[in-house]
Image: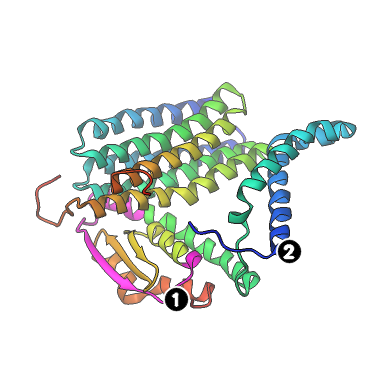
Amino acid sequence: MDLVEMKRDHRAFAIILTFCVMFAFWMLLSAWTVYLVEPYDLFVVSSKGILAALIVTFLTYEIFVPNRGENVLLKMQRFIPYLGWELWQIYLATIDVTKRVFGILEVDPRIIEFDTTLRSDFALVTFGNSITLTPGTITIDIEPEKGRYIVHAIAKEPADSLTVDQIMQKKVGYVFMEE
Amino acid sequence: MLAIDVVSTVFLALGAFFMITGTIGLLKFPDFYTRLHATGKCDTLGQILVIIGCMIYEGFTLITIKLLMVSAFYLLVGPAGTHALMKAAYVTGLPVWKKGDKRM
Amino acid sequence: MILPFLVVGIIIASTILVCSYRAIRGPGTFNRIVAANVIGTKAIVLLILAGYIIERPQFIDIALMYAAIAFIGTIIIAKYVERGELCSR
């Protein structure tokens, strides 16, 4: 893994943001009821949290706050309805597997390949995870240069809904603005 | 029995049913790739439903947030582990089952 | 209110026993890895339910740590079987 060269003010911003998130997480898990009961014991209790948060911050701040892309706020805003649609697809996927286990629908597996227009890391990973959570398909391999996916499908209808209909490509392309 | 207890018991029973279905699929399917389909999807949803049942029983305390973190973490890493196993099998050359073959 | 948690816990524990048939029988390495992964997932749920039965809420922290460690173990085994070695220089 090659480390990206970071500018000085971006490095300071990354360290401060990572430290705040880590300390808030520690306080949420371990010690927030102490602050309600005895407010003058603040420093003794939270010194352990500050030490642990400092160690983790200096080990991992380059990974947590990457170099800024474009329109990050708009992409985050469009991402949340996509998460809701995906939770509904998890439920449909489990109903589909239940029907195939008990013999109502048939098992006829095949392997398919197709290309997409997504290029950035986060978009490729999100699409791969969504294929795994959709009824009937699991991702096998991804090529980042051409956006090619190799997918194992369990019958003909889930395979068609990926290559012929292309519902999910349009949704992910809308969220990440068709990278 | 209160209404919250009944709702929580319904979610726990649904989660247990989906986990039983996932394990029957693990025994019954004819190939490694199809068995990954069964366990990767049924186990994820069964676990989420059991944890939602426990969250409804609890109310709004700190423990609810910790349970939410366990279930959100597994929702992220479950499909990633499934994909990693399937890629390792495909690259090493495990044969794929077509319809009409012998069971492997 | 302990009775529903106890019944669901016993059902999931018997599911673990059924799943170990695939761990013993499965022809080849990969079926056994899948069975171990499934047993790890069900162990997380069993830890949370055991915390409710004994009425100690600290078991949820143990479940969170075990989920992280089981995920890392699965990824390392998959990488080792794919390449024949763990880190290539």
How dense is the environment of label 1, judged by Cα within 10 Å: few (below 14), some, or many (20 and up)?
A: few
Q: Chain of mark 1?
A: A
Residue drawn 55% across and 37% down? C64
Please state the horizontal and vertical placement of residue A34, each as a whole percent of the image: 80, 32
Could you give the CA–CA distance between mark 2 and mark 1, rounded to whole angstroms?
37 Å
Q: Is residue A6 above or below residue B30?
A: below
When asked about the image quadrant of residue A135, the answer is bottom left
Q: Which residues are magenta?
A: A95-123
B53 to the left or right of B32: right
Identity of the residue drawn at 68% across and 44% down: A25
Q: Name the residue beneath numbered marker 1.
A: A170
- Marks 2 and 1 in Cβ contact (< 8 Å): no
In the displayed structure, B26 sits above or below C2; it is: below
Q: Residue at x 30, y 48 (%)?
A: C83
2 vs 1, front mark: 2
The question of residue A77 being in magenta is answered with no
Q: Secondary structure at mark 1?
A: helix
Q: Is residue C42 left or right of residue A149?
A: right
Residue B96 placed where, x, y %? 18, 54
Q: Could you tell whether B17 is left or right of C31 in the image? A: right
Reading the image, the residue beneath label 2 is A9
Q: Position of residue C12 (x, y in %)?
A: 40, 32
The mark found on residue A66 in the picture is none
Q: Residue lying furthest right in this view?
A: A40
Depth check, front residue: A10 or A155: A10
Secondary structure beneath dot 2 equals helix
